[in-house]
Image (cartoon, rainbow, N blue to C red):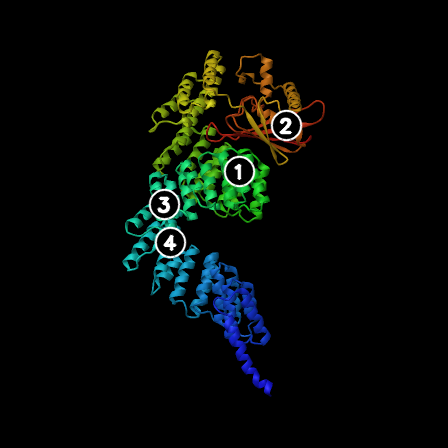
Amino acid sequence: MARQALLPWTDSLTYSSILQTLGPTSSLPQVQQAHAQILKTGLSNHTHLTTKLLSLYASLLCFSDASLLLLSFPHPDTFSFSILISALSKSHLFHHALRLLPRMLSLHLPPDNFVLPSALKACAGLSALPVGRQVHGLASVFGFASDPFVESSLVHMYVKCGKMHDARRVFDGMTHRNVVSWSAMVAGYARQGYVDDAIKVFNWMRESGIEPNSVSWNGLIAGFNHNGYATKSVAVLQKMHLQGFKPDGSSISSSLPAVGDLEDLVLGMQIHGYIVKQGYGGDACVDSALVDMYGKCGCTREMLRVFEEMDQMEVGSCNALIAGLSRNGLVDDAFRIFREFKNQGIELNVVSWTSMVACCAQNGMDMEALELFREMQLVGVEPNSVTIPCLLPACANIAALMHGKAIHCFSLRHGVIGDVYVGSALVDMYAKCGRITDARYVFDMMPTRNLVSWNAIVGGYAMHGRAKEAIDLFLLMQRSGQKPDFISFTCVLAACSQTGLTEEGWYYFKSMSCEHGIAARMEHYACMVNLLSRAGRLEEAYAMIKEMPSEPDACVWGALLSSCRMHGNVSLAEVAAEKLFKLEPENSGNYVLLSNIYASKGMWDGVDRVRDMMKGMGLRKNPGCSWIEIKNKVHMLLAGDKSHPQMTQIIERLERLRMEMKRSGYLPNTDLVLQDVEEQEKEHILCGHSEKLAIGFGLLNTPNGASLRVIKNLRICNDCHVNQQSGTSDAECGCLILLTISTENNSTRVDAIIRILLATNLSSIDCSLIKRRKKGDRK
């Protein structure tokens, strides 16, 4: 009896001791010690004590212990759940927070105005709209839909999920609107590109007596910049400053990218001065934005100076520096600095690697881009939906179809295939690798399409010389509600140019401005000059050039010069070449083209004069270069290069094929050898073209039935691309050619199908598709 009488007094002492241990400044060991004492003394049923313990675990971010403790409660209440749900939401552990909500409801515990805002914050963080709507329903059922905190959280959730109509409906029903809810609406409209609505709500807020704070202004600035309204974003920053609101680091870092997009260096330097004056220089986001701004404005010296003056290297600023160097053509420097960052142990993220992949792909370093893609996966950085569209152009540039297919499979495995830009890049890659059917399949399977997608497929058909399909898709695009832009018309005009549809070309050229309000650009004039010139209407093309509203660029004159070679018009060729020599004095291709025109007419004095000009300027002819992909590796062969380890075997194989073709009635077109040498020497020169070397290399290293895809940096010559059935060249039209090649020593029969893919300008790359078939295969 005496022992039982002492128990209440002992429990009281233990309770007081534990409560003193569980103070606001308690460390994790102290909390765990108190927890052990609670379990030992049997005080687990004491609600106040266990709730205090739960709150401390949550504040110390020990969520696993807190969750286990909550689940051990015999009779938990709503307050206990609200503590943990709130703490998890504040720590951005949104999935864990939302998992507790069904558990609470299963215990028949009603949510209150503390649980609901935390749950809505988790829904906003995950953009989990369906769950957010369910939580909204719970708020209505339990009578908290009109609670100010719940209403504000609902507005924030719908804004984050991009449902401005729902957010506005909740907002309009609010009886007490504070600056937080006003700012959320302003930022939401601005971020989704609803400029007028954003400004209207912003002005309405001020008229309602609610003065905007820095969050309100920053929402406008960041939202407009995010949607490409650079001018409006900068205007809001200036207005903010003029009206006495002090721009903070967020305002500056949000507006500087817009200043860079406008290439307004003067304003950028003024903002830089403000940053120094206000002491924002140590802010990592501000420093990164400054580096980005100077890079966009082409001021690499200032960009490097800002980077070097930073207190510490941060991955965001490293990314901005790499992108800035790449944007200004300093690819080698970007690559070197990227490697230095990596060697210094800076944890480069997916943005860093993607920037470098894009840098290589956009500057002709296609093989390096593919290697970087492999390397980033080896170091544990997973590519995302931005990396893939940056990488696929590298595959397209060198016709690396197998690499492109592998990336397609990667997109499927990682669930990014539904991204509209990934799909568009795949369409473009397949088209440029000669697989227009696969390009169309990818296009048809895309869940959503934008203008980029439509332009990619229209341009693909144009590149393949299939003008009818290109025009049909162009019309379908408009029927689908997509408005064409200047690129769309470039693709259509190029399609008309490839197949000689002069009247159709004129129609679309005129309708571009008359019906769609799009002013003709240089590329459109270049297409029209090419269209008229290829049809033999050189004087009409020249007249069009002279009537252009602005000074023609090299693309336009280049189109005329190329057609002059086709039709042998020396006088116009000299006019076009003279203009090109002034516009592009260091482009050796223009000199070579004029020299070839002279040579085709036997005007050897003109050839010597052009060669002397090139020699005096230190220019050399760009060698023919072809790429071929074999066993997932891309090989490069140069015309006239004898250093390839298999060159002897390649020449032997080509010589055997040449002899067999001559026995079958083929005669080499030696007129294409624009050199004053013997006829036999001309035949040997034709065999040394890089595309023929690539084909020979492919024949040596692939089994029967394999496909060979060859891509070349220059136009393919007519002798390498000739229609044996008609005896005329199709190098300029892009139709299918059938060549039958046989060998006498064995029974191998090779059927080669060559498809030339011509793009919209003279410097574009031609692709050849050659398929080997086994003996007995039928056409």
Closer to the chain start, of discs 2 and 3, is 3
Q: Residues within 10 Å of mark 2 (few under 14, many from 20)?
A: many
Residue type pointed to by label 4? Ala
Q: Nearer the viewer, residue 520 or 80?
A: 80
Tag on residue 429?
1
Closer to the chain start, of discs 1 and 4, is 4
Q: Is residue 768 left or right of residue 316?
A: right
Q: Residues within 10 Å of mark 4 (few under 14, many from 20)?
A: many
Q: Which residue is mark 3?
A: 276
Name of the residue lying farthest toward the bottom: 1
Q: Label 1, label 4: how many angstroms apart (C-alpha)?
A: 37 Å
Q: Is residue 255 left or right of residue 411?
A: left
Closer to the chain start, of discs 2 and 1, is 1
Residue at coordinates 52% horizontally, 31% vertically from top-left? 757
Q: Residues within 10 Å of mark 1 (few under 14, many from 20)?
A: many
Tag on residue 697?
2
Residue type pointed to by label 2? Phe
Residue 635 showing in the rendered view? yes
